[in-house]
Image (cartoon, rainbow, N blue to C red):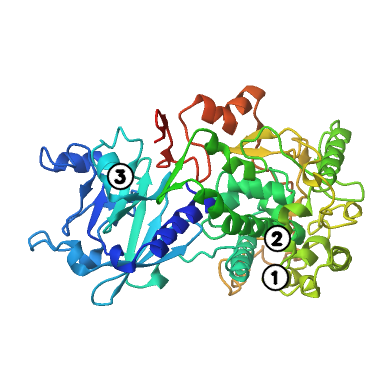
Amino acid sequence: MPEFSEALVSALLCLFLLNSVPPESLVVQNLWADATLAESSSHPEGSRASLGHVFTLDSDSTALRGSSDSQTPLYPPALSTDPNDPLVPIIEHGLKLVGVETHPRNVILKFQDRDSKVHWCQVQLLKHTVAQAFAKKDWEEAVCKVDRTDRGFKVGLAFEFKEYVLAFLTLDLLIQFYWSPNRASLASQPDVYLDFPRFLEDVVKWIADRRNVQSNRSGNAMTLVRTSTEIFAGGGVYTMPELWHMAGLAPNLTEAEVFDSPSRTARLCAAYYHFAKEAHTTLWPLVKRFLVGFVICVDEKDRLLYSERLHVHGKDRSYVTARFRDLLSDLQGVFEARSKEWLWIRQCDDSGPFDVFEPEFIRHALESEEINLGSLIFGGEHWANLCASAGLPAACMSSRNPLARYYASLSLPPAMSASWLNLGRYTYLFHSPETTNALRASHPLTQLYRISKSDIWSVIPAFPDNSAPIPRARPPKPPTENVSPPPPPPPPVKRGKPGKQKRQSRPRAPPKPKAAPVLIPKPTPIHLCDSSVRERTLLTYIIKYTQDFTVGPLDYCGIARRIKGRGGDL
């Protein structure tokens, strides 16, 4: 599934087209799509759809796309016609592209018809999907004349304009379109970079809701966040391990271990902010180098360029600072020292274990004056000292943010809310610009883990099997009703023989309330892959020896490939 970076690039390409051509040339002339196998068989023999070619949608189209249980129409419902009514070509509505919005998981298009009515289209990028804008000639020659099974991608939906065709290309037609007259009814998850306050508010609500669930929250935190539809929109199978690395978190921490710690939670949110700002400010200039017109086109060596921006996913080694290297060595030392114990509790004391966290990886967030999570990460006093040494403005020391307010309202035991940081290692915040290659002082090997059928790349080792999270008391079950149950009826009086009095039994004392049993959480099992599996999963191996796609906007289904001919590039 396209993640934050891929969705952003698709939206920015649409925006680049919008801002580069005359507005009057962006009136929709036709809508195109590839048919599913079932749809192909229902079209007349010899038609474009029956031959496996992309075809135009008529106003009575009933084609649906999306998840099987909630599919939506390709053709805008407000402009469709009943099967018994005359067809109305879409060009007669004067539907013009007038706006594009970025979104962590979608591309949002804004159209306006000749009556000034607005039609919003949310393009949900469900799997391998990318936006490309073909010149009319290239569309007719390279797409329209080639069978969908031969061209390597399928057309989810394409908007034909006067000179260009804006197409959303997919691997297997797993894509969905939502048409609406108003923006409010469509996707609204915040972009962490564009709306950091709202992103944090959503995280706070999610944490609070999860804490109210009768559970010890022992599931894998990374898997939980990755599969959530409420927070960290755009974070998927490769983005999440990147964020975990940037936040200094081990891959098998539980939900409670991450989100009961203000520092760990703040580091994770700050990591996503840094990741998103990097994407917003530097990714489009990279992609723009490979545009041929409005089509992203790369050769073999270019496919790996995006991976140079990654820390761990699919990488053989990760470049880190000397501080990161030393913290990693400290953590490995703790694991080795406790390897003979039958079971030890993951509780941080003066000797660790400490998180392997390098502030350089979240620098954008730590330099933010609008909202800064530094005091949550390091503690107010230590953060003030670090700010002073780094020359950061006073605004960076503010702790006014939704996350800080939430954790201030909780009463968490110190062992559970620890920062997990060895503050003695943080005598400075960032490395001096004069320090040559400070960010590449060491290059440890990555490790590949599998958890819940997902790959997790990490330099930070998983906590060993003979360790367990801090035990938590099982929360009491709430009563079924607020009203107290009536007292039981008195026992029947037993009558003895006449003349004899039955000895009254002493009333029993009420049972003492049972103490809440202590639970040692059972984290989701994690498996370290062997070297041969790891080798075949490296991005370099996939590109060199397989036909599979990897990650990033330069190596995805629908990205054009530059080939060499006698006259040069084609």
Specify few, some or many for label 3: CA neighbours under 10 Å numbering under 14, 14-19, or 20 or more: few
Q: Real-space Cα distance between discs 1 and 2? A: 11 Å
* Residue bearing the label numbered 2: 364
Label 2 sits on what residue type? His
Q: Quadrant of residue 464?
A: top right
* Number of the front mark, 2 or 3: 3
Specify few, some or many for label 1: CA neighbours under 10 Å numbering under 14, 14-19, or 20 or more: many
* Residue bearing the label numbered 3: 138
Label 3 sits on what residue type? Asp
Residue 291: x percent and y percent?
Answer: 45, 48
Secondary element at image label 3 = helix
* Residue bearing the label numbered 1: 371
Residue 244: x percent and y percent?
Answer: 68, 48
Q: Real-space Cα distance between discs 2 and 3? A: 41 Å
Label 1 sits on what residue type? Ile
Residue 534: x percent and y percent?
Answer: 63, 28
* Number of the front mark, 3 or 1: 3
Task: Identify the residue at image location x=66%, y=63%.
Answer: 496
Secondary element at image label 2 = helix
Secondary element at image label 1 = loop
Residue 465: x percent and y percent?
Answer: 74, 35
Asked whether, in this view, residue 320 is left or right of residue 278, the answer is right
Closer to the chain start, of discs 1 and 2, is 2
Is residue 235 visible in this depiction of the protein?
no
* Number of the front mark, 1 or 2: 2
- Marker disc for residue 441: none
Please tell me how many numbered marks the rendered image carries. Answer: 3
Closest to the observer: 78 or 280?
A: 280
Closest to the observer: 397 or 523?
A: 397
